[in-house]
Amino acid sequence: MVSRAHGLRPAVFLDRDGVIVVPQFRDGRSFAPRRLEDFRLYPEAAASLKKLKQAGFLLAVVTNQPDVGNGLVDRSEVDAMHEIITRELPVDAIKACFHRQIDDCNCRKPKPGMILEAAGEVGADLTKSFMVGDRKSDVEAGRAAGCATVFIDLGYALPPPDSPDYVARSIAEAADLIIETVLTAQEGP
Ligand SMILES: [Mg+2]
Ligand SMILES: [Zn+2]
């Protein structure tokens, strides 16, 4: 169903909080859950990711978790959250940046470091891949990596991204839209 030029496959890169994980909302903004007991996957995440898998996409989570670098959350707590993701969802890789903004690392989105690293690991063709996220920095990272971008608009009181390729309201909508886009492209002119 999908092309495999040079053995590379299309992938969907997924932000974590606000995409597959229910964020905590405060003052029109969203935050990563800090405690394992507050960690919840969106109910539709499993079915949405399974659909993408069946359509031939590799799946990789790429997430900024600066609460770790800022000493607000233990790394072990985040690792436990990611074990749940690995167990419940059909993902091929999870990349997390634990740095603070001032660390100026190459992995923190909007830089494309985590996408590039995950792509190399799983064998993704970035030109046929998508980045899905709920913030401007997700769209910018996806664009910098050469992917199409899907902005999940949760109505935050934050500046929206400049011209994402697609806009959706949930991971379920994003998955349907990605699959539809690929099917349309295959029908061709
Ligand atoms: Mg997010
Ligand atoms: Zn980093």
Image: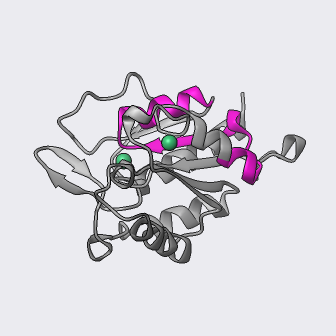
Of residues 68 and 179, the one drawn nearer to the viewer in this rendering: 68
The quadrant of the image that shows the C terminus is top right
Using residue 155 as the reference point, say whether residue 47 is left or right of it: right
Residue at horizontal 28 percent and vertical 70 percent from the top? 35
Establish if 111 lies above or below 48.
above
Extent of the magenta region: 118-145
Residue 85 in the image: state x and y as whole percent: 49, 70
Residue at horizontal 60 percent and vertical 33 percent from the top? 147
Residue 103 in the image: state x and y as whole percent: 44, 35
Residue 189 at least partly seen: yes
Q: Which quadrant holds residue 127?
A: top right
Residue 90 in the image: state x and y as whole percent: 59, 68
Using residue 146 as the reference point, say whether residue 18 is left or right of it: left
Q: How many marks?
A: 0
Q: Which quadrant holds residue 92?
A: bottom right
> Magenta stretch: residue 144 in it?
yes
Residue at horizontal 61 percent and vertical 56 percent from the top? 59
